[in-house]
Amino acid sequence: MRIIHLFADLCNLYGDYGNVCGLKRALENKGQNVEVEYQSIDDEIDVSGADLVFIGSATERNQKVALQGYKDNIKAALDNGTVILATGNSFEMFGQSVTDCDGVKHEGLSFFPYETLEGKDRIVTDSLCDTSLCGGDIIGFVNKASLTTGATSPLFDVKQGSGNGKDDSKEGVHYGNFYGTHLIGPVLIRNPQLCEYFADMLIKKQ
């Protein structure tokens, strides 16, 4: 099993590397041999052949720098069945655009239909969500300065806390083998049942 932690140096706020550690242990507990590979801007980025690619939360500046230039390689991996998990604000760049608080529009990877608008006020809250992926409530922490609209396929239903947009009851995105959520904490450590879901799903895809 091959996991690539992409931009671990640029997109790793709030201890989100713990998602990779938790998933690796869950897979190993199920008898899998797991290799974790780290790739960043100074490397020749190639995510083809990975079972899962993880990208964590970043500052607003790093978020807009990290993925540029790698669109074709990432799209090819998605098309070939690689699972991508993006937490915090990293998933926003997989949409159409991110407009910063100065009104400057930054083009996203345009894989999915949503758009993001950043503001000067931060949303900082604990969230309680529900999902059809696995049993039990999903908990996480949100710290963002953005509102995301147009996410036609959300990941979670919000029971308490913040969704993608203002007063939105839907959180994150789920398109095929792409999973994105603003929940940090890290989300797979705080929600073992969700970590088990990803581990079982990856094993079934082999």
Image (cartoon, rainbow, N blue to C red):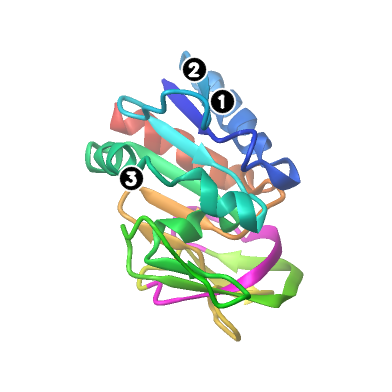
| Mark 1 residue crowding within 10 angstroms, few (<14) / some (14–19) / many (20+) | many
Amino acid carrying label 3: it is: Lys
Magenta residues, start to end: 131-151
Q: Nearer the viewer, residue 192 or 2?
A: 2
Q: Name the residue under label 1.
A: 24
Q: In terms of sequence position, does the residue under pointer 3 or pointer 2 come before the other?
A: 2
Q: Which amino acid does label 1 sit on?
A: Lys
Report helix, strand or loop for mark 3: helix
- Sequence-wise, the earlier of marks 3 and 1 is 1
The residue indicated by pointer 2 is 34
From the viewer's perspective, is 175 left or right of 123? left
**Residue designated by label 3:** 71
Q: Where is residue 90 in the image (x, y as percent from the top left)?
A: 54, 53
**Residue displayed at 43% across by 47% down:** 68
Mark-to-mark CA distance, 3 and 2: 26 Å
User: How would you rate the neighbour count of disc 3 (Cα within 10 Å): few for under 14, some for 14-19, many for 20 or more?
Assistant: some
Position in image of residue 53 (x %, y %): 44, 35
Q: How many angstroms separate mark 3 from mark 1 (CA)?
A: 26 Å
Q: Find residue 15 and report its horizontal and vertical position in percent.
A: 73, 41
Q: Which residue is drawn at 46% across and 17% down?
A: 32
Q: Determine whether 171 is above or below 178 in the image.
A: below
